Amino acid sequence: MRKLLVLALVGLVAQLIDGSLGMAYGLTSSTLLLVAGVAPAAASASVHLAEIGTTLAAGVAHWRFGNVDWRVVTRIALPGALGAFAGATLLSSISTEAAAPWMAGILFTLGAYLLIRFARPLRTDRVGGRLRGRFLGPLGLVAGFVDATGGGGWGPVATPALLVSGRMEPRKVIGSVDTSEFVVAGAASVGFLIGLGSEGFLLPTVAALLIGGLIAAPLAAWLVRIVPAQLLGAAVGGVILLTNARTLMRSAELDGPARPALYALLAAGWLAALVLAVRALRRTRRARARAEAATAAPATAGGVPTEASDAASAGEVPADLAATGTPTPR
């Protein structure tokens, strides 16, 4: 019972992260299950089965908050489902010994990617035009395959690619990726069911992860508007990096002083990424504050000299401005 409660809490936290960041439910949950000794295929299968429920709840919540672009969802979900089914079939056919380092390697790479991605300022400006199907289709195919074989990866692959394009609002990127993941999770579950049979799913684990995720889904759809993705992404990336490094070092049979030295190196990299993320977040907020201040500044009418604007900002309205009927600045 204690283990199930812990898993439910993990599902809740993972869904809060996923709904706020657009990624990391599968990465967080699969990493924990691998650390607990669950076979890679069973871990990925159980997480994806739980995701059918959590992504449905998240999709409904994001839709109600207006965070979904249905055109993007329809063009990325089907290729993603095909990639996920293929990835689940492949992972089901690999032995546990061979799959463990493979899956840990994918998770480790995605964790490192999160660290690098969120240590830099996030792009917030948007360019014109719409995303084309020839971009969304291959993106969904690759993201779905990585998601099934790695136990997670749909969000870490799809979300940054859509954000970098600059053609969608960040909240709509997250909402659309989370909503389309419902189809991807269903296809992956079918692939695991064919490859592993029903015994490949750890049903108590699925239920615990599902309950926690369902509780968190509506809150996460609201948090996406206020939580700083910069810090959250860097923090999650470091956790995934360190936990999966354990499996990789064990597979490489690294012992002695090499293991703590590598842990120390990874921890230092994580700390550096967090510091850079904080600095990037502060720079972004300062730039946004300056832009808002410039927009809110009283406009000068009819080529009024700069001195007049300065006086107005100090609360002193020149007579020539008052005579033209320019509103007194507040």
Image (tube, rainbow, N blue to C red):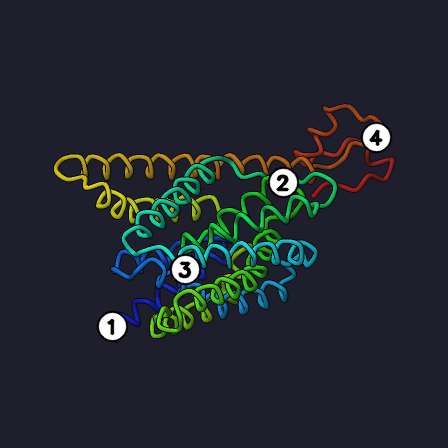
The quadrant the N terminus occupies is: bottom left
> Counting other residues with Cα less than 10 Å from the Cα at mark 3, is it few (<14), some (14-19), or many (20 or more)?
many
Indicate left or right for 229 with 254 as reference: right
Residue type of the residue flagged with mark 4? Asp
**Regarding mark 4 in the picture, which secondary structure is present there?**
helix
* Residue 165, numbered circle: 2
Name the residue tied to disc 3. Answer: 14
Question: Vertically, is 159 above or below 273?
Answer: below
In front: 292, or 298?
A: 292
Q: How far across and how far down the image is residue 143, in percent?
A: 52, 50
**Regarding mark 1 in the picture, which secondary structure is present there?**
helix
Q: Which residue is drawn at 36% across and 72% down?
A: 208
Name the residue tied to disc 1. Answer: 2
Name the residue tied to disc 4. Answer: 320
Label 1 and label 3: CA atoms lie apart by 18 Å
Q: Which of marks 3 and 2 is nearer the N terminus?
A: 3
Q: Which of marks 1 and 4 is in front?
A: 1
Residue type of the residue flagged with mark 3? Ala
